[in-house]
Image (cartoon, grey):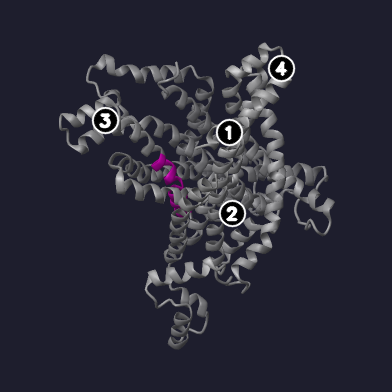
Amino acid sequence: MLRYILRRALIAIPTILLISVFVFSLQKLLPGDPVLAMAGEERDAATLEFLREKYHLNDPIPVQYFNWIGNAVQGDLGMSLRTRQPVTELMAEKLPVTIQLAVMAMIFALLIGIPAGILSAVKKGTVTDYVANVVALSGLSIPNFWLGIMLILLVSVKWQWLPASGYVPLSEDFAQSVKTMLMPAFVLGTALAATLMRHTRSAMLGVLSADYVRTARAKGLAERRVVLKHAFRNALTPIVTLTALLFGELVAGAVLTEQIFTIPGFGKLVVDAVFNRDYAVVQGIVLVTAIGFIAMNLLADVLYVVLNPRLRGQ
Amino acid sequence: MTDAATPSTITGATDPVLSRRPESRAWKKFRTHRSAVLGGILVLFFVAIAVAAPWLPIPDPAATDWGAVRKAPSAAHWLGTDEIGRDVLARMVWGAQASLLAGVVSVAIAVILGVPLGIVAGYFGGWTDAVISRCTEALLAAPFLILAIALAAFLGPSLTNAMIAIGISATPVFIRLTRGQVLSIKAEDYVESARAIGLPTPKILSRYIFPNVLPPILVQATLTIATAIIAEASLSFLGLGQQPPAPSWGSMLNTAKNFLNQAPWMALWPGISIFLVVLGFNLLGDGLRDALDPREN
């Protein structure tokens, strides 16, 4: 088992290196001389040369890459041009906010997606199944930032139940924090629920026709017990791994959700960085999310083996 | 893309009666697939609007009217006006053009880059395959929208750059899909025999491999157009796509968000349109998959 995990982790290293090359080369796409932007008004030759030396811009590109990646490995992703804070520090500040949003969204997604998927598989071909499928497909087709806007319009503007924006840290006021995060988490969660429902449905359909389910039914077990204990348990493996793989969608969705509800998280950080031309921050975020995504992939692979006893011995 | 999928190239046979079969069977299956037909109608509706935009009797989408700022829907402005008095209906119609263009062009970029790379990786294997596959994995590791945002940020915000960014971000999916298809087709007897009688590689690729990888790519392309349209709307919503004053559904929603109290209609129509056109492509893609899948009856 440990050897399997280690081998999978080793395979991930070249992928991460390739991503880092890609992220590094992004800055070479930029038109113009970065030194001119940094120097601002003082464009005399001496200042420009000083800046070039200071940021090692005279070095050959491969050397520049190795300097960059060498620092990145030590947790130094450069400085934000705007706030003059280290990029890693900025990210560490914003991360808890997005994690709270992501966890709450995931709870919504699981609470909606899994029961809906089970129900639609058990009632395959009925009106319930049809309605669940239509709702899921609509969920996949609705841009979630629009859903957010519509919810603000109804819940905040019209009924005035929940605040339209703002953020209260969990440590400050737990109840208020959860309350302000409720609507954004719902918006983000429904987008994932649609995907989760479709996967749960197909996984359940796969196991419901298996022999052991027929045996359980033949034994005269209650249908509820057959579905939940015998079928769902076995359908859980693909569902768990797929949930880990939803990480990418979760991060991308968080960018838009945070923008609509003005939540000061990771996603807002990347969008603000883009508009402030704070490229070091953008690069740092792409690199860190990609590594996070690879880690989730790894976790999905490992969970798949852990949950599936038949694969354990191999 | 579709004209290469003529009946004779799909089967590789020359008999006109025999060769027509799989396609007409697929078409028949597609026609009876109710949701797929609904999807097709939705897509056609928006395509018709986008193409006919210059000839429709609507005001100039960029014409401002300070006497009619944020007016609710009326006989003069069916869908109301926006924050600087522009006609929302006119902007919706021209926005359809931006959305569909973005969807189709970015997927075309992804297909043009991805399919040849996938064929090369799958057919030649070895070292070439290793390099292409590792790069694909690396690109797939970055979440789609994050990658598109980063690319759009570094290329500079514009509709063209958004399309390039979305296209590049969608490429790895097509590389992987094509590679997998080629791997399974390569092992088929008819490819083996083509190789055995000494057909040159380019001919095997163009006559046997390419036509057979097309159906799943067509399905994936249709579904990816749906994703790309949402991605363009997202980028425009963030200000990284279509630049003002040119209309786009995403940027209309971005402005509408600031006037929810005073002019809620500004937020309604762009969202409904994105939803309907994306739903259309999703239904169409699902229907095509069912129709083109030889395993299903």
**Image quadrant in which the N terminus of chain B is located:** top left
Residue B208, by quadrant, is: top left
* Circle 2 residue: B238
* Circle 4 residue: A223
Question: What percent of the width, then of the height, locates residue A241?
Answer: 58, 39
* Circle 1 residue: A309
A95 left or right of A309 in image: right
Mark 3 or mark 2, whichever is nearer to me: 3
- The chain letter for the residue carrying disc 4 is A
Q: Are marks 4 and 3 in contact (CB under 8 Å)?
A: no
Q: How many marks?
A: 4
Amino acid type at circle 3 is: Tyr
Residue at figure coordinates x 82%, y 42% from the top left: A159
- Inter-mark Cα distance, 3 to 2: 44 Å
What element does badge 4 sit on?
helix
* Circle 3 residue: B208
- Front residue of this view, candidates A294 and A168: A294
Amino acid type at circle 4 is: Glu
Q: Are marks 3 and 1 on the same chain?
A: no
Which stretch appears magenta? B159-176
Question: What percent of the width, then of the height, locates residue B106?
Answer: 43, 45
- The chain letter for the residue carrying disc 3 is B
- Inter-mark Cα distance, 1 to 2: 46 Å
Residue B80, by quadrant, is: top right
Instruction: Examine the structure image and report whether residue B172 is included in the region drawn in magenta.
Output: yes
- Front residue of this view, candidates B59 and A23: A23
